[in-house]
Amino acid sequence: MMLDGLYQEIILDHYKNPHGRGLRDPFDGEAHHVNPTCGDEITVRVTSDLTDISYDGLGCSISQASASVLHELVQGKDPAAAAEIHHAFVELMQSRGQIEPDEEVLGDGIAFAGVAKFPARVKCALLPWMAFKDAAARAGVDVGASPEVKA
Amino acid sequence: MSFDVARVRKDFPIFDREVNGYPLVYLDSANTSQKPVQVLDVMRAHQERYNGNVSRSVHTLGTESTEAYEGARARIASFIGAASPDEVVFTKNSTEAINLVAHSAGQMLRLGPGDEIVISEMEHHSNIVPWQLLCERTGATLRWFGITDEGRLDESQLDSLITSRTKIVSVVHMSNVLGTINDVSRISARAREVGALLMLDCSQSVPHLPMDVRSLGADLIAFTGHKMLGPTGIGVLWGRFDLLAQLPPFLGGGSMIETVTMTGTTYAAPPARFEAGTPPITEAIGLGAAVDYLTGLGMEAIHQHEQDITRYALEQLTAVPGVRIYGPASVEGRGGTVSFGVDGVHPHDVGQVLDALGVEVRVGHHCARPVCSRFGVPAMTRASFYLYTTTDEIDALARGLDQVRKVFG
Ligand SMILES: Cc1ncc(COP(=O)(O)O)c(C=O)c1O
């Protein structure tokens, strides 16, 4: 089936066994994002030193797995590294499948390369990352100007 | 006489195509319907041979265009049992028709604090937001019917919900999510008793059910062309003529006036009063052709076919492990729209796997978020049927759901 590119084993694994799920205290910044077309929601909390990134939400396998990968990749990183990862992930999702992702930077995130070919699902993958960016900003952490996300 | 669905399908060119290597299984007609050649041909012929602006030229093309446009209005009027074509106002879609009423009736009734508008939890966003906006503008209060566990309107509080404070009641005739067909007789009687206007959102009912506005008990109805084999960009507001005649205009511009001076304007009679600017002429004519097509087959026969398909679909879906159906469990008082959940799998993922098999369903909140919230889910998967839907397509859906459970099992 042509779905193999979308539902990579890694994505399904993160979906079924999410890392770091559940909202935790203490935190310094929180953001709640909604995907208005499908109603999916996520809340992300971060501490100002990024030692904890916690989240909870309702959503499809892509958005939930993406949150799990975000947690795994970014938690504990310094702001510059977090910004680099964030930028790379957003850029990958907007590439329509034209970019070869760098596993050094994106780790399990490279499994999302296939999602970029399904325009209707890109927003799902980006939902936790956009919420993270806002939560980080509220905690005083700037993860940089990521490429603008168009609906 | 049995309904010949195979013949019907031959009129729809889109069924020749494949999706992702599979024959197209289109189960999203509640979203928008497919179009038969009879509609496409009429629209093309109009553009190629008769194109002119309506109601404002003495030349031949303008006259022919006007005749075709007004002819469509007349056929649509008789399709819904309107007393006269003048009761049919062309709009862009249902959404615009409802907004028109929210503006014009809100103004006519001089709504203010203490007045109430009653809708329901079962509404499409387009029958919620215009009323919320009206309440914000005027200080009126919005109230609503709830939904029962079976997916029907909860009328248990009817008399305390619709009271002398109620000025407008606007509810959906057939739910675009649950498939429920609302018997509005009690609501209509109560609205009449208290002197409130009753509007029905018939976006999902006019395409699928025989419609007679004279016996429906409503003052106004809205429906949309693209869900009934017509094109996008054309919808209808029907209203009792004496009511339309009292309503002030919504949009101002050309064609809706009687005379204009620099100091003031008087307005045309309905329906022109509500059709400011050049209307979607080709689209109106296309909708007229759609109505001819539906009339040719007979709305009773179409409804019967959809009942058969729906009965089959309810059986097949109930038999899939982990599937939960939202809305009435039997075909009584429901139409051919079935929303469901697959245990442990998000609707997006259900829809994605089905699409890979050529099966096109809608997933999400269906522009009716309160309905999803009522059933405690952020989203649902919806299969919706029409005159061209076959039992084979339902089988393809059921097979697809097996595949969904395999991928996410
Ligand atoms: C019940 C109902 N009301 C209103 C609408 C709005 O129709 P439109 O978007 O064509 O205005 C729809 C369709 O989406 C609907 O199903």
Image: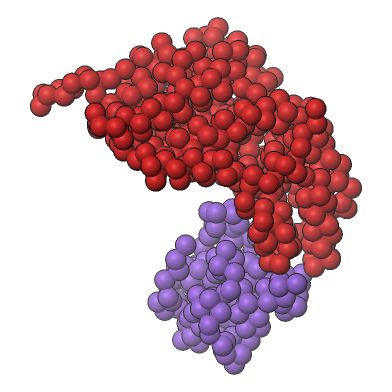
Residue nearest the observer in this picture, B286 or B383: B286
Quadrant location of residue B37? top right
Picture quarter with the C terminus of chain B: bottom right
| Tint applied to chain B in the drawing | red
Which chain is purple in the rendering?
Answer: A
Quadrant housing the N terminus of chain B = top right
In the depicted structure, whether residue A38 falls above or below residue B128: below
Please give the name of the residue rendered at 57% of the width and 74% of the height, measured from the top-left corner: A116
Q: Is B385 placed left or right of B311 in the picture? A: left
Determine whether A111 is above or below B46 in the image. below
Q: In this view, does A19 lie to the left or right of B365?
A: right
Looking at this view, is B114 or B255 the one in front? B255
Q: In this view, does B393 lie above or below A17?
A: above
Task: Provide residue A39's location: percent of width, then percent of height.
Answer: 59, 53
- Residue B108 coordinates in the image, percent (x, y): 35, 18
Does the rendering let one see residue B373? Answer: no
Q: Residue at x 73, y 28 (%)?
A: B301
Q: Would residue B96 be found to the left or right of residue B229 on screen?
A: left
Q: Which of B228 and A34 is in front in this view?
A: B228
Q: Is residue A81 left or right of residue B305?
A: left
What colouring does the structure picture have? by chain
Residue B326 vertical position relative to residue B192 in the rendered view, above or below: below
The answer, for residue B248, to whether it is visible in the render is: yes
> Residue most toward the left?
B262
Q: In the rendering, at what x and y percent does residue A11 appear?
A: 70, 75
Residue B115: name its quadrant: top left
